[in-house]
Image: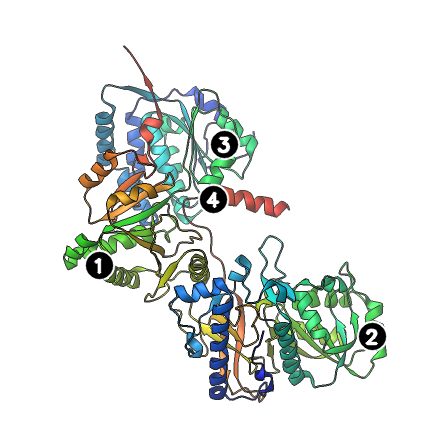
Amino acid sequence: MSEPYEALVPGSPAPELLRAAAPLRPFAPEACAFLEALSDLLLQQRSARAYAELTALAYWMRRASIRRLQADCAARQGTALLLARGTVFHIAPANVDTIFVYSWALSLLTGNRNIVRLSSRSSPQTEVLLDAIAALLGDAAHRTVGERTLLLRYAPDDALTGRLSAQCDARIVWGGDATVAEIRRIPLPATAIEVAFADKQSIALVDAARWNGFDQARRDGLAESFYTDAYWFGQMACSSPRVVLWLGTAEATAQARADFWPRVERVIARRQERFSDIDYVDKLVAADSLAIELPVRIEASANNDLTRLWVDRPGLRVPHFCGAGLFLESRIAALDELRPLLDRKLQTVCYAGLDSDELRAFVAAAPLAGVDRFVPFGRALEFAPVWDGFDLMRVFAREVTVI
Amino acid sequence: MDVDRSCFDWPVFGLADADKRGRLERGLGELTRLHARNCEPYGRIVQALGVDPMRDYGLEAVPLLPVRLFKQYELKSVPDTAVFKVLTSSGTSSQQLSRVVLDRDTAQAQTRALVLILQDFLGKARLPMLILDHPGVIKDRRSYSARGAGILGLSSFGRDHVYALRDDMTADLEAVAAFAERHRGQRVLLFGFTFMVWKYFVGALRRTPLRTPLSDAILIHSGGWKKLQDEAVDAATFGRALEEFAGVSRVHNFYGMVEQVGSIFVECEHGRLHTPAFADVLIRDARSGLTLPPGQTGLIQALSLLPASYPGHSLLTEDLGEWTGVDDCPCGRLGRTFKVHGRAARTELRGCSDTHAAAVEQVAGASA
């Protein structure tokens, strides 16, 4: 029978036949063994080791790491009785190549059967991953997982998305506002839930006075971490900072900026590959557009790998944003000035010169209109089972009450 | 607008570089001041950059605008009452169009510049002119495309105009034959856009056994080689076909843009594009922003003294080029010369968001 999709693992079950296999218990040995085997395979393969994001994924799936995740889940869950929902339909984003595995793995560990739709646009990283996954699922040792897994690709096709949605108990939509709007038009079974990941953006927050008090080595290390957060995916990851918000007095901020940016520029000079010519033009267009629409000052920089604009009135949005190292800077005098700026589109605050206790107190003090996570410099791009405010292990499970 | 137009008294290809540089710096500085004062968005950009418009800057330090801004904003330095016409780019329908606002003075300056430049290549006599396009391109006189502007601009330079194409883009071979017959043995001028010339004019002539009896035709064409490169047609193939099928003895390509109509850069018989006295070109490295020496490829920055009704006197294009020399072309024309290597490539979308949506658009675009 010919299906209107491309199954990425030979012998995968048809969507309607997935149900023949019962869900697994949370952290079933077969699920853990599969992820561990995938981790081993990625760490062994030279083709996979060439990509930092695949290495990061492999480490995240190691046995010890899964154990920690299990312990963490047990602690959070307490006495609640959690079971797999059944079948989860994941719609993966196109260009963050590893997201589909994180989403699928967490759902698998919860015990679900999974349908994973990958983007029709491929990348070398995705192909390496798919080869490894297909090799493992082709092995009889991983049949339990294979029977519960359908990885596929297809061009936009509402009828097919509808057919797959009809089979699912939860639909997870990655890929931003437009994708969410497209997919939301397509119905789900009445008992199914949907979690959608909207377009989000992120900022950096630096306490100026404390920055000025750090020793040289620490400041260099933080500059390096900031570079990783901002530039690793060309600043286009939703967790990469676009705004740098300085916390403190005008004097301390002036001093900190004069120290911070040259350090960042030294890291850029050492690590950044050339963007395309059009990326640089795009930034120039963005900077000029911002200058037309906002009272900004375009700051001088060593070269066009870094474009920064100062605006007196703080804001967390960057209209005309195009990535490739474009930052809007402003200053707040106290942390509470952040509150009125927050909205649901803010995902990550990457911080330096603050500590987690202060930030916890800030969050606990009053309801916040937005922000999903605070992470120290250097950890913006780390995936975590709580993402955009959703505890995915919990989303993938249903709770049964026994009184 | 009261603008100094003494640049039209300068020898159009006769200013040595040092002399030209000084004159351009003064003229461009004057335009920077004028636009900073009269075009609010431009004034804001200049202010954000910390540029003091009261100063004259060296040629390399004149503030530049990315040409794409004309697609996003209406940038004009004249009041609405002074608007004489608005040019739009002839890009494909899915893209936003550039809008270039002209007052009478700038429109006239464009025409004068074009005449001065082309006279240097064609002589002063008006030549019988065959336009390798269709007459519909210039129907609306207040607002028309770059193609229309180019045709109108060059038309004033010829006589006995005949359109070689009909409105449905088929070649009107009888009209062409009649034109050739009328001007047998005379020098004539042909003008068209590179791709149109190839596809609709050469294409039609190829399919007919008739040969036009043009014997001394000069073709001026522009618009870029991109589409022809896709068909593996280079300048030499283009020239040979025109000679064989249409009796064209000389071909001059020119580089220009709707945002700087008039100050065009014409290719001489040695294959170099020439900058006229009132315009220049710098090549910039996109990463460093610095100007590049001859022989290195970078983004083309086009400078022109003509735009007074809109802030287009210093524009960063999205075209790649290299400069080939200054005051040293064997053809004898002074000034900087350069080559164009085509459009800088756009890279793929990246990031977390909306990639399925992009795929949807692509599919929709393909079926449209």
Please name which of the two marks, 1 or 2, marks the residue nearer to the observer.
1
In screen coordinates, is A214 left or right of B92?
left
Whichever of callouts 2 and 4 sits on the residue coming sooner in the sequence is: 2
**How many other residues sit within 10 Å of disc 1, few (<14), some (14-19) or many (≥20)?**
few
Measure the alpha-carbon separation of dots 1 and 2. 77 Å
Q: Position of residue B345 (x, y in %)?
A: 50, 61
Q: Position of residue B219 (x, y in %)?
A: 70, 76
The residue that label 4 is drawn on is: B355
The residue that label 1 is drawn on is: A251
Q: What element carries label 2?
A: helix
Q: Which chain's residue wears label 1?
A: A
Measure the alpha-carbon separation of dots 4 and 3. 16 Å
Measure the alpha-carbon separation of dots 4 and 1. 43 Å
Of residues A177 and A95, the one nearer the viewer is A177
Whichever of callouts 3 and 1 sits on the residue coming sooner in the sequence is: 3
Measure the alpha-carbon separation of dots 3 and 2. 63 Å
The residue that label 2 is drawn on is: B179
User: Given contact means CB atoms under 8 Å apart, are the residues at marks 1 and 2 in contact?
Assistant: no
Instruction: Name the amino acid type tagged 1.
Output: Glu
Q: Which chain's residue wears label 4?
A: B
Instruction: Name the amino acid type tagged 4.
Output: Thr
- Residue at 59% x, 44% y is B364
Count of numbered labels shown in the rendering: 4
Instruction: Name the amino acid type tagged 3.
Output: Arg
